[in-house]
Amino acid sequence: MSPLAISGGDPVLRHPLPRYKSMSEAEAQAVVGVVRSGTLSGFYGSWSDEFWGGPQVRAFEKAWSDRFKVKHTVSMNSATSGLFAAMGAVGIGPGDEVIVPPYTMSATAMAPLLYGGIPVFADIEEKTFGLDPAAVRKAITPRTRAIIAVNLFGHPARLDELLEIAKEHHLFLVEDNAQGPLAEDHGRYAGTLGHIGVFSLNYHKHIHTGEGGMCVTQDDDLALRLQLIRNHGENAVGPLETSDLTNLIGFNFRMTEIQAAIGIEQLKSIDEHVGRREKIAQGLTRGVERLAGLTPPSVREGCRHVYYVWAMRYHEEELGLKRSTFCKALGAEGFPVFEGYVRPLYLLPAFQKKVAIGNKGFPFHLAPQRDYPKGLCPVCERMHEREFIGFEPCAYDLDEKLQDLLVQAVRKVHSSLAELRALERQEGEGSKS
């Protein structure tokens, strides 16, 4: 191995990784067709046939339902909107508790707050980072109304166990599947097992429409409630003779015809887009799986992992080197990794200060005994502070040659631990002086 790049040697990768671009001529022509039609949105906010959206939106929803084998798909302008709508659809109200994971994008935990629900954090598993069913059981109280499970990084949470818990306690299970299109749990698509599943079409996902999201459900009533919340439902509940008006003050969460037209073309090529990321991630795993002190992503038996993030665990005690030093050395070699994913969400100011809706503590004052101290979810905190190293296969246009160079970078750094320990000591001594 040549000298480490962090010490002045040549890096393994001499150029930045190329960014991935999933748009093709098919998407361009689809957009042109919509523009020429003159109908950029087919929605109308008052009750009419246009309440359900335009031709592209309806075609995209049908194509999504067909692909993911669900009865209903309701498009949204983002997955965040989808999560908000899902909380409204299942009837979350002031003081209701919703069990959420602490290691996910913030919208997952913020969604219950929109309706006065109180997020209750349950710890994650250390191997696949999904909600730990044992922690979920401990978090259930008489106030609990729903569970949001996140299929984080593209690996399904323990959905069967969580469904069993939900059924036992008469709870709703909502799947945040923003990172897991085509992920599978024993032959079933992640995002389709819960009462509502939410997918993301944000620009850095496996397939995308720039911004956008899709909610799926097998339940007729939940589908209608999602549609009403999406599009000013207060105008439609009369004509539809809706008896339960809970949370049906609607929003504008509507997808445009241009987004839907792009989405139709992206969905046609989803196998290619997901498969490329999956193949690269599996190659990275094979390349580093025998290196002491590093644990590449785990895949639970019967599951398919689609690798929105390739998440490696770093064992500092075994390697005798700080994670930060190891990651700096990898970065110098041209492997763009990141430490930790997100800070545990209960440490955000909204939870520490208990200020969310208004400035008088709503809805937290409805459960004054509920606190969010550091140490609440020790596995999550350990992953964030010491173990987790991530790489985003979705962000880059990678082939086997680049994959092999990334593996070479890890092996080069791993073989130079003694040199890095010495460098770390020198930096420590320099800071003291």
Image (tube, grey):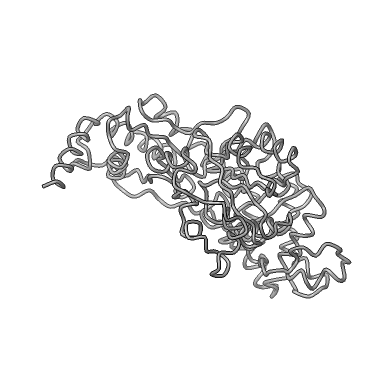
Q: Quadrant of residue 210?
A: bottom right
Visible residue check, residue 26: no
Query: Does residue 163 appear left or right of residue 245 in this picture?
Result: left
**Is 36 situated above or below 110?**
below
Query: Does residue 225 appear left or right of residue 330 in this picture?
Result: right
- Of residue 363 and residue 305, the one placed in the foreground of this image is 363
- Of residue 239 and residue 122, the one placed in the foreground of this image is 122
Extreme residue in the left direction: 433
Q: Residue 128: x, y in percent? A: 53, 35
Q: Residue 423: x, y in percent? A: 18, 38
Visible residue check, residue 155: yes
Q: Residue 318: x, y in percent? A: 32, 27
Query: Does residue 397 appear left or right of residue 238 in this picture?
Result: left
Q: Residue 335: x, y in percent? A: 35, 43
**Quadrant of the image containing the N terminus:** top left
**Is 393 situated above or below 80?**
above
Q: Quadrant of residue 225?
A: bottom right
User: Residue, x 32% and y 30% (percent of image)?
Assistant: 317
Q: Quadrant of residue 306?
A: top right
Extreme residue in the front direction: 369
- Of residue 244 and residue 198, the one placed in the foreground of this image is 244
